[in-house]
Image (cartoon, rainbow, N blue to C red):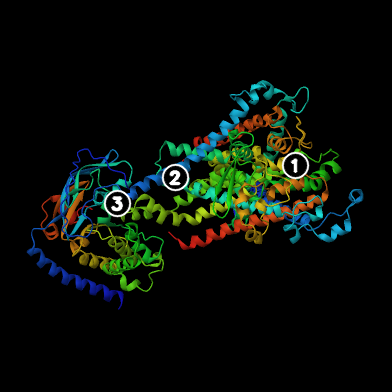
């Protein structure tokens, strides 16, 4: 309900006769009529300023789209990326080698592969653990436990991604992956590998999945659970077969948002997964993701106008499109499949 | 889950066992996060507290570069020390410190606050108080949710074009706007190039959606009876917002702002995109201590347009270096960063708790 | 004094007042009108809530609106200070005048109107500020900046609302620390601080205990010497106790309006009689 005190009510047969009858008691000024006042002008100015603040976010989106479009798709001077490199090459070529002196190749598949392998690994770890934590917190945990776990998850969510990248490179690979896989199982593990990056990305998305799923689970009314118990279900039955399906839209949306976040993750994968674009599914090798590529190009000494430099805008455009679609999809899932409870 | 008497059933026992396993699995998952967090903090802290034991490679390297290992070791017994906080980066690990990064982060924090809070709170006020449930509000809300999900590096690209290069409008050399303020000269370079201001504006765009959403929730929590009572006393809309709604929502807004700011402090990718330097041995505006502010006050005017680095970038840079000593320095830097973030989050929680008691609706 | 003793003393005082009141009624038959309503129809979107209501509110009197729940009395009350403007989708036809001025004319400044027609709500809503700031809020936003004048206005309003003695040593304390009855009197003082001519009260005592209710009723009785008061109440006995005029509403229609004594003893319409005698409610 919006409250707006100065909205005039529309009155059809309202005869506006401003009769100035003399006020018997001189307490307030007799006339109620509106004259120009600084207060009213100020109100309008304030309203405009606040509207501009709100519109700034629209400007931001417009800015992103314009910049990416101009550099990657089409520019008046003909300098955009896709005006030189064909889209089919970009999307379907399997080699990403922009620096090649004779024949640079711009197939994005290796970068896409790197991004999705790491996001996938992160999902395998983060989604089940996050959901299980959410189920535990909403169905099983005592209030004291919640009071401890929730701050811990908030802290986990607040740790900067460079820290996770450092942890992956300096601890997960040498002290966890190499002892298990290389020393014991004999599989070669590179220093930069996708698995360590995937593990920390998974840990990073646990808080996202947990808090959003928990909100969805708690929104399921108690009546449903009680109906389940009354039919002779165990707590396990009720949680998994009654509550989770009822909260499914929220849970799915949280999954999509978490994966989108994993896809957009930059610093952890740059540090842990390396700079070598590689089209492979082997998690023990290094791979470059789309985000890492963008970072590495800007850190390097690539010339600003060259095709190689422009390729970063094409990659950024792809990244933007992918994450935006996932976010939009998540919101659509939330709206479409939401059960409306009394 | 005790089943007794003639209600005992073998099939039921199996279901209870499965249920028990499930509960343990969920409990384990919940504690997993706790375990990982402790592992992370302990391992990084341990690395920050001691230099690596020099192996054969290190000794060879030291001999080759003629560095005096013993003297260097005396300089700093462990990576994390007060000397660490007051030195600049260096090619010699034992001499390196995060002073430049600390001051860079501090300047960023100040400017991000200045630019984000008015705009964010203003937008939230507009969305919650002024706009009707119309098309514009829905468009802006959807837009905000989408912006919140955009990867931070894309904001870096936006900042690069808009703030650092300003679309190339000022040609190759750019212009400089000079303002004579009487006691000093304020020189604003256009475009902003790789300065603190570019970084701060880029980070502002990044955290603006979260600030707006947090402020909106705080405003929504103020009961409408307060607004109604205020209107009934003859107040205009802005008077009601300014005197009643905003003060009542302020604790929630501040908490949200501080949490968003701590996120901005930890961001690396956008700053790398706009060109924050990874090796820097000076502070913005040459202000490297509080006393420098007195001696060199014009530095305050130069600092926003000076090059800079930040804590996360310094950490990233050290991680990328080959020598193992820099791993330890990075760990020390991480500890400092985590302490700063912890202080900010604690402040946010304290504010939330203190003011929640005062205004019991 | 125990609660029972103070309560019975209040009842005794009221009986005394009522004798005085009844003698006054015989004296003055003609009264000056403060608010005039002509053919008012009110709509919430498509749904009509008030049907062709016309009445006169005389000044310096207490007019009570009674009727069962949902009959439109609160809606009608809110049309008198245009509080319905805040709700989206409302509209009305007809005319409402304050001392002859049409309050729904397009040139009218709603803010100025609400300074002259104040309102007290059913649930007391003190601002989460100090007692002083609560009462001083109205004058402050009207432009009064002089601190001494503000203090004078606050003291006078609190005295008029019979709250001054209880709070004069703790003006900076939070208003939320007061009891329910005190908070409601604070809201009355707050409304009085803008120096209104008319005071609209929407079931002001319905959320209070009997002792506080009695004090509010005494207060209303005193206030009517200087203010025009319109009060909505679902408690018929309350209307009988304190009002000079009573209007009975039913399902959006104004069924009957008359002097309180006449309405309650010899109502003209059957519906009024049924309601008063409790045949429906």
> Closer to the observer: label 2 or label 1?
2
Image quadrant containing the N terminus of chain A: top left
Q: Earlier in the sequence, mark 2 or mark 1?
A: 2
Residue C213 appears left or right of A47:
left
Inter-mark Cα distance, 3 to 2: 22 Å
Label 2 residue SS: helix
Residue B138 appears left or right of C41:
right
Inter-mark Cα distance, 1 to 3: 63 Å
Q: Which mark is residue A50?
A: 2
Front residue of B285/A95: it is: B285
Image quadrant containing the C terminus of chain A: top left
Q: Residues within 10 Å of mark 3 (few under 14, many from 20)?
A: many
Give the residue at mark 1. Answer: A272
Q: Chain of mark 3?
A: C
Q: Is residue B3 visible?
A: no
Front residue of B293/C156: it is: B293
Label 3 residue SS: helix
Q: Are both tags, 2 and 1, on one chain? A: yes
Tell me residue C117's x, y (percent): 25, 55
Q: Quadrant of residue C222?
A: bottom left
Tell me residue B176's x, y (percent): 59, 42
Q: Chain of mark 1?
A: A
Q: Are marks 3 and 2 in contact (CB under 8 Å)?
A: no
Residue, x 32% and y 64% (percent of image)?
A: C186
Asked if B287 appears above or below C39 in the picture, the reply is: below
Label 1 residue SS: helix
Callout count: 3
Q: Which mark is residue C111?
A: 3
Q: Chain of mark 2?
A: A
């Amino acid at each position: 309900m919006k409250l707006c005190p100065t909205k005039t009510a529309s009155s059809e047969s309202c005869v506006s006769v401003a009769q100035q009858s003399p006020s018997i008691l001189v307490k307030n000024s007799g006339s109620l009529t509106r004259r120009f006042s600084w207060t009213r002008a100020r109100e309008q100015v304030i309203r405009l300023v606040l509207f501009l603040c709100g519109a700034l976010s629209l400007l931001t989106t417009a800015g992103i789209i314009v910049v990416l479009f101009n550099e990657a798709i089409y520019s008046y001077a003909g300098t955009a990326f896709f005006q030189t490199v064909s889209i089919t090459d970009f999307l379907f070529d399997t080699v990403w080698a922009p620096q090649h002196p004779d024949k640079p190749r711009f197939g994005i598949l290796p970068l896409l592969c790197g991004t999705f392998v790491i996001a996938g690994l992160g999902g395998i770890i983060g989604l089940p653990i996050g959901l299980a934590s959410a189920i535990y917190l909403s169905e099983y945990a005592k209030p004291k436990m919640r009071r401890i776990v929730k701050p811990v998850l908030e802290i986990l969510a607040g740790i900067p991604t460079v820290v996770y990248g450092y942890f992956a490179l300096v601890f997960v690979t040498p002290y966890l992956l190499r002892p298990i896989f290389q020393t014991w199982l004999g599989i070669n593990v590179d220093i930069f590998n996708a698995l360590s990056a995937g593990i920390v990305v998974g840990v990073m998305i646990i808080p996202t999945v947990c808090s959003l799923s928990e909100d969805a689970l708690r929104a399921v009314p108690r009546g449903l659970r009680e109906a389940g118990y009354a039919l002779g279900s165990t707590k396990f039955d009720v949680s998994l077969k009654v509550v989770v399906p009822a909260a499914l839209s929220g849970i799915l949306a949280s999954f999509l948002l978490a994966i989108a976040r994993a896809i957009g993750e930059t610093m952890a994968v740059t540090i842990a997964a390396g700079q070598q674009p590689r089209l492979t599914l082997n998690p023990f090798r290094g791979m470059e993701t789309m985000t890492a590529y963008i970072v590495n190009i800007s850190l390097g000494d690539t010339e600003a106008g060259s095709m190689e430099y422009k390729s970063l805008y094409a990659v950024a455009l792809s990244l933007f499109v992918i994450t935006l679609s996932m976010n939009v999809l998540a919101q659509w899932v939330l709206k479409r499949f939401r059960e409306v409870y009394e | 889950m005790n089943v007794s008497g003639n209600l005992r059933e073998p099939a039921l026992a199996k279901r209870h066992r499965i249920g028990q396993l499930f509960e343990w699995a969920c409990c384990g998952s919940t504690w997993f996060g706790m375990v990982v967090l402790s592992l992370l903090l302990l391992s990084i802290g341990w690395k920050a507290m001691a230099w690596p034991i020099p192996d054969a490679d290190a000794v060879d390297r030291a001999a080759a570069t003629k560095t005096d290992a013993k003297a260097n070791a005396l300089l700093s017994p462990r990576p994390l020390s007060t000397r660490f906080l007051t030195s600049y980066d260096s090619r010699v690990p034992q001499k390196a410190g995060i002073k430049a990064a600390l001051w860079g982060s501090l300047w960023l924090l100040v400017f991000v606050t200045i630019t984000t809070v008015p705009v964010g709170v203003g937008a939230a006020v507009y969305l919650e108080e002024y706009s009707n449930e119309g098309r514009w509000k829905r468009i802006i809300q959807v837009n905000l949710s989408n912006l919140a999900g955009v990867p931070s590096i894309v904001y870096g690209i936006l900042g690069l074009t808009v703030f650092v290069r300003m679309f190339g409008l000022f040609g190759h050399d750019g212009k400089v706007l000079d303002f004579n303020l009487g006691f000093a000269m304020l020189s604003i370079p256009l475009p902003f190039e790789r300065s603190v201001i570019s970084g701060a504006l880029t980070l502002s765009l990044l955290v603006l959606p979260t600030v707006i959403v947090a402020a909106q929730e705080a405003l929504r929590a103020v009961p409408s009876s307060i607004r109604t009572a205020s209107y009934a006393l003859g107040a205009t809309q802005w008077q009601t917002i300014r005197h009643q709604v905003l003060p009542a929502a302020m604790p929630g807004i501040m908490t949200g702002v501080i949490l968003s700011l701590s996120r901005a402090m930890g961001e690396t990718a956008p700053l790398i995109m706009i060109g924050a330097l990874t090796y820097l041995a000076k502070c913005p505006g040459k202000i490297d201590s509080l006393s420098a502010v007195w001696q060199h006050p014009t530095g305050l005017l130069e600092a926003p347009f000076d090059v800079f680095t930040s804590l996360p970038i310094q950490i990233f840079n050290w991680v990328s270096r080959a020598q193992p000593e820099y791993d330890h320095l990075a760990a020390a830097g991480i500890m400092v960063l985590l302490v700063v973030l912890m202080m900010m989050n604690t402040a946010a929680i304290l504010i939330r708790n203190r003011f929640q008691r005062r205004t019991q609706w | 004094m125990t609660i029972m003793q103070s309560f019975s003393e209040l009842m005794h005082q009221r009986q005394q007042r009522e004798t005085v009141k009844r003698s006054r009624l015989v004296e003055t038959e003609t009264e000056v009108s403060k608010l005039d309503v002509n053919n008012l129809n009110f709509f919430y979107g498509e749904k009509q809530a008030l049907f062709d209501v016309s009445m006169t509110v005389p000044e310096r009197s207490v007019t009570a609106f009674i009727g069962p729940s949902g009959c439109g009395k609160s809606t009608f009350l809110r049309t008198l200070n245009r509080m319905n403007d805040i709700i989206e989708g409302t509209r009305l036809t007809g005319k409402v005048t304050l001392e002859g001025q049409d309050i729904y004319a397009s040139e009218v400044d709603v803010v100025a109107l609400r300074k002259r027609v104040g309102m007290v709500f059913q649930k007391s809503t003190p601002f989460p500020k100090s007692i002083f700031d609560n009462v001083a809020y109205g004058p402050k936003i009207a432009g009064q900046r002089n601190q001494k004048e503000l203090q004078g206005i606050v003291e006078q309003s609190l005295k008029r609302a019979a709250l001054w003695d209880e709070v004069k040593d703790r003006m900076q304390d939070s208003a939320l620390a007061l009891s329910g009855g005190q908070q409601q009197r604070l809201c009355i003082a707050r409304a009085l601080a803008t120096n209104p001519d008319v005071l609209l009260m929407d079931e002001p005592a319905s959320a209070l205990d009997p002792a506080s209710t009695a004090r509010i009723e005494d207060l209303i009785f005193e206030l009517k010497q200087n203010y025009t008061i319109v009060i909505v109440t679902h408690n018929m006995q309350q209307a009988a106790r304190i009002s000079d005029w009573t209007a009975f509403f039913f399902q959006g229609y104004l069924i009957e309006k008359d002097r309180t004594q006449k309405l309650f003893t010899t109502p003209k319409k059957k519906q009024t009689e049924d309601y008063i005698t409790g045949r429906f409610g």
